Image (tube, grey):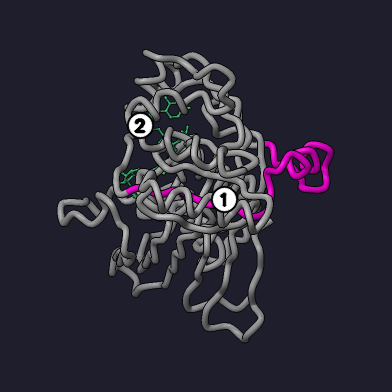
Amino acid sequence: MTVPAAVSVDCPAKTNLTLEVGRPRAEWGGRHELDTIYCAISLTDTVTAAAKPAGAGFSLDLAGEHLGDLAASSSDMRRNHAVLALFAMAEACGREPDVALSIDKRIPVGAGLAGGSADAAATILALNELWALDWPIERLREVAATLGADMPFCVAGGYARGTGYGEIIEPIDEESELGRALQADGYAGEVLVGAYGDQLSTPEVYRAFDAVGAGEGERNHLQKAAVSLHPRSGRAIDEALAAGARHAFVSGSGPSVVAFTPTPDVRRRVIAAWERSGAVDRIIAAEAPARPRVTAVGLPAGSVTVAR
Ligand SMILES: C[C@](O)(CO)[C@H](O)COP(=O)(O)OP(=O)(O)OC[C@H]1O[C@@H](n2ccc(N)nc2=O)[C@H](O)[C@@H]1O
Ligand SMILES: Nc1ncnc2c1ncn2[C@@H]1O[C@H](COP(=O)(O)OP(=O)(O)OP(=O)(O)O)[C@@H](O)[C@H]1O
């Protein structure tokens, strides 16, 4: 197997079509029991991993117009989720982390879109190729699960059910009965993401959930907590639904809002409503579902493989 000089991975953001939150578990470090349907959307970060000389150590370059708190000079590179994934993979396969990582960031930070988890999953997929490990998805998910609740899902994307604290993943094939039901229920095709300059801290939203509980009839049990901390998200949801969106909800722990728009006319109406009211700071168009895309660089053209 030819070893590529570098590997690039476009990794999708994550949203939750349902998010049932149970009680916190001490044995999980206080994380809550979850039963969720994850859906990856085609808003991606690109992570490129390139080999460095033995003993050179790792490096991280970060590019993007909306880096949130990652842009702060005080942001510790060693705590970046992509670097944590590099260290975890090096540990798991007994190699040194002599790798140059570069991240082209488009997923808003601290948005409820698992941007950090997507970068970690992309790094895991890239190293699987760069180091010619050829480990199966299940093995890659085991490494991801040691890093964060959302990461195992991000390794393969698509639709999946998550249980435990979110790390136990049962993929949902788009052709399966549940996959078809999700698509028939409008959870496929064009989505609009209402993004904000603000971030919400996931632990803070879970703490708020412990205080206020889930909203009546809301499929995302964290939505009421997220809206209590970031009211603009609630207005954006109401406006998207009034404009004809099939579904509109806070994405995960928020603050970003995801709206499924079934027709171009509804899409135009939601954009017009959000632009008129200023309920969101940025609008990003994407499609659902989506999967990571792995490209080995420095190999003959056409070496693209899609993670399954
Ligand atoms: C909100 C979701 O995005 C829904 O998919 C995830 O549950 C959050 O996943 P994540 O950001 O990867 O979460 P982690 O990095 O594992 O945990 C961050 C913090 O979120 C809270 N947390 C996370 C997951 C979970 N099932 N229960 C929790 O209470 C805990 O305070 C935890 O310390
Ligand atoms: N590569 C990364 N991309 C984004 N955030 C990162 C990254 N590495 C570390 N972080 C930190 O993780 C925190 C959460 O970022 P992230 O974008 O993953 O939040 P999120 O989308 O709300 O996550 P989730 O939906 O999983 O709760 C931020 O404060 C950020 O500083």
Which residue occupies the foreground of this view, 269 or 16?
269
Q: Is mark 2 within 8 Å of ligand 2?
A: no
Q: Is residue 293 left or right of residue 59?
A: right
Which residue occupies the foreground of this view, 68 or 170?
68
Q: Is residue 5 left or right of residue 200?
A: right
Residue drawn at x 38%, y 52% as measured from the top left: 108
- Image label count: 2
Residue drawn at x 76%, y 45% as measured from the top left: 173
Tag 2 residue: 231
Q: Is residue 169 left or right of residue 32?
A: right
Q: Secondary structure at mark 1?
A: loop
Q: Secondary structure at mark 2?
A: helix
Provide the residue span drawn in magenta.
170-196
Q: Do we see residue 90 in this rendering?
A: no
Asked whether disc 1 touches disc 2, contact meaning CB atoms under 8 Å apart, the reply is no
Membership of 193 in magenta stretch: yes
Residue 283 location in percent, x, y? 44, 55
Q: Residue furthest front?
A: 276
Query: Where 5 sits versus 224, above or below?
Result: below
For ligand 1, give the image quadrant.
top left
Quarter of the figure that contains the C terminus: bottom right
Q: CA distance from mark 1 to mark 2?
A: 32 Å
Tag 1 residue: 155
Q: Amino acid at mark 1?
A: Val
Residue drawn at x 18%, y 54% as measured from the top left: 72
Q: Amino acid at mark 2?
A: Pro
Query: Where 69 sits versus 62, above or below?
Result: above
